[in-house]
Amino acid sequence: MAGNEWLRKVTDPGKRSAILELNPDFLEIASTLDAEREAGRTRGPLHGIPFIVKDNIATKDRMETTAGSWALLGSIVPRDAHVVAKLRQAGALLLGKATLSEWADMRSSNYSEGYSGRGGQARSPYNLTVNPGGSSSGSAGAVAGNMCMFALGTETDGSDAVYVLDTIYGVDLHDNYTIAQEGKTPLGGYSQFLTTSDELANATFGLPWQSFWALASEEQQASLIGLIRLIESAGATVINGTELPNYQTIVSPDGWNCIERCAFAHHIHGRDFGTTRGYPNESEFTYVKVDFYNNIKTYLAELQNTEVKSLEDIVQYNYDNDGTEGGTPNVQPAFASGQDSFLASLTTKGIMNSTYYEALSFCQRSTREGGIDAALRHNGKQLSALLVPPDVAQTYQIAAQAGTSLQENQVALALKTAAVIRLMQTLPHSLGYPMITLPASVNSSTGMPFGLALMNTAWSEAELVKWASAIEDLQLKGNSRYGRSSPKWYGYKQRNIPVLNI
């Protein structure tokens, strides 16, 4: 797509909600990359391929990095995020910054998903009136709306693109969280594991029905079971009932609980950030709110041209600018609960006490050996992957809890800090237990898409690439009705805030 044509598309009032800011230099960069190609120099498969990044991923250029908040407007980051630097080196073309849920869903417990003070409301091109799907809504919406070839978000459990993965994986010397992958990634990258549907004859997949599938809608169950029957017809074995042993304790029946997230079985109704709603020493939010307090302070310390240096400063800015940032509950319609998650983080003062470590240990133990790993070992046989419905948000929530934490990394423990490049790298527990999602169909009432996801154990990206590419090949070559559908832009003229959670 030519540059001017792309500009017309992204500035269409009904379709521009995915893009928060355009890269003012993208046409010049595109010309340079084109000249390199004409001169016979191609940097790789991503040469000249356009992409965007979420506004909490740092770019050392003329664009802002603000996590959607007016508080950081004008601040200057010290360097490109590691993944951005690697993509630029590979010749990928950065078009701009994506809209997002402000502070990547960390500031509030009751909010309009995809909204930020600076970026406004991100909307899905499939249905502009409903929840667009997560804090990285702008990144996803830009790709779904054909505004770019790929996009980066953060905490995107369930997202993948192999050539991009080949470019961005690896240790970031400025980010201790990434050290855990040393020795656990394949030589030669992940594209070597791409395969065809013939490989499915060697696959044995599990369906954790009571753990996740029972929580999906009947329509999604029926559609995805149809896709699974197609997978079986290609020779794969699919075993039902491969449950996470303690799913009744760790999997909420009410959807993703962004505050408590764990030990829901002990809860009483109402939100109280890990005090009486469940046990604090079994709650993910117990350690998330501590990590956020410490990591945001570390990040802000590296910024120039800003007086915002702590979570306390952010909270005060939101109060001082209630009309746009909604620090007080029920002032800004997108932030019904104000900044209650920030306030919960603030009370911890970043102290890693015994309750912190007990909660971390419980959540990881119950989702790893007592969860995903146990489900993958079915009657003594190691399954190829678990097939799950990712519209049931608890699937990738459990995968995120199971991942590797900074506290497990001895180097990071010794340093007691992390020079965080990405603005919101605040969830260290989200590394290592990957998922990958394949488009499957759309909801008949809302027009929103849904998919089939594959879940596996720690550092199993290569396995997931193999099996997902085999299923994708089956979908494509058989002209299957299961796959990606083009967006219909339902509710094109509507501007409701908050978005509908249906």
Image (cartoon, rainbow, N blue to C red):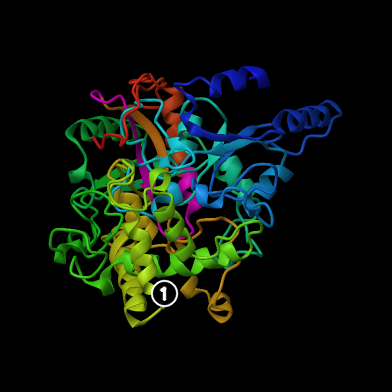
Residue 461: in magenta span = yes
Point 30% across, 72% down: residue = 362
Q: Residue furthest right?
A: 39
Of 468 and 384, nearer the camera is 468
Query: Looking at this view, is 15 or 177 the one in front?
Result: 15
The stretch drawn in magenta includes residue 412: no
Q: Does residue 50 appear in this view?
A: yes
Q: Residue 470: where, in percent of width, then height?
A: 46, 37
Give the image location of residue 169, x and y in percent. 60, 53
Q: Which residue is mark 1?
A: 349
Residue at 36% across, 39% down: 133
- Is 232 located above or below residue 418 in the figure? above
SS at mark 1 in the image? loop
Of all residues, the one furthest to the left in this rendering is 268
Q: Position of residue 29 (x, y in %)?
A: 75, 33
The x and y percentages for residue 42 are 78, 34
Can residue 2 be seen here? The reply is no
Label 1 neighbour load within 10 Å: few <14, some 14-19, many 20+: some
Seen from the viewer's position, the closer of residues 353 and 70 is 70
Amino acid identity at mark 1: Lys
Which residues fall within the magenta stretch?
444-466
**Displayed quadrant of residue 438:** top left
Q: Is residue 454 above or below residue 424?
A: above
Residue 94, picture quadrant: top right
